[in-house]
Amino acid sequence: MPKKALSCHICQSKKLHKFLSLGPIPLANSFLPPAQLSATEPYYPLDVCFCSNCGLVQLAQVIAPEIMFKDYAYLTGHIRADESPLRRACRECYSEV
Ligand SMILES: [Zn+2]
């Protein structure tokens, strides 16, 4: 079960104000293997809050990293951070000329 954030992740203020609730949703990038498709997928609340002390917008609940990243499909090694989308588009256009 997620823990409610009791203080701001940046300034530790307790002046957190929930302003958006998107309801319970499954974890992003957490895909069930075929053998588990008929099982009930875990859902977690997706609530967003604002810190009136520093202005940070953050999730209102904290999901334990061992749950959040257990089977996380986002692989940073597959993302080219050294190349902007515009530069990549230009390179691909020039390679076709
Ligand atoms: Zn804050």
Image: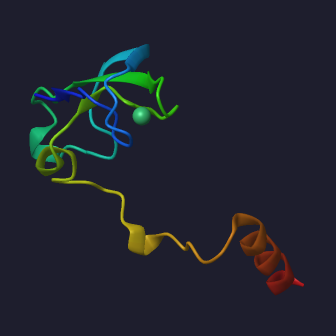
Q: Residue at x 56, y 72 (%)?
A: 81
Query: In the image, ligand 1 is in what quadrant?
Result: top left
Number of numbered discs visible in the structure rendering? 0
Please identify the quadrant where the N terminus is shown: top left
Q: Nearer the viewer, residue 76 or 92?
A: 76
Tell me residue 20's x, y (percent). Answer: 45, 15
Would residue 41 appear left or right of 81 to someone viewing this image? left
Q: Residue at x 20, y 43 (%)?
A: 32
Q: Is residue 93 above or below residue 28?
A: below
Would residue 34 appear left or right of 87 to someone viewing this image? left
Tell me residue 14's x, y (percent). Answer: 31, 24
Please identify the quadrant where the C terminus is shown: bottom right
Tell me residue 33's x, y (percent). Answer: 17, 48
Would residue 89 appear left or right of 44 to someone viewing this image? right
Q: Nearer the viewer, residue 37 or 44?
A: 44
Q: Answer with the quarter of the image where residue 95 lies.
A: bottom right
Tell me residue 73's x, y (percent). Answer: 31, 56
Q: Answer with the quarter of the image where residue 77 lies.
A: bottom left
Q: Nearer the viewer, residue 10 or 95?
A: 10
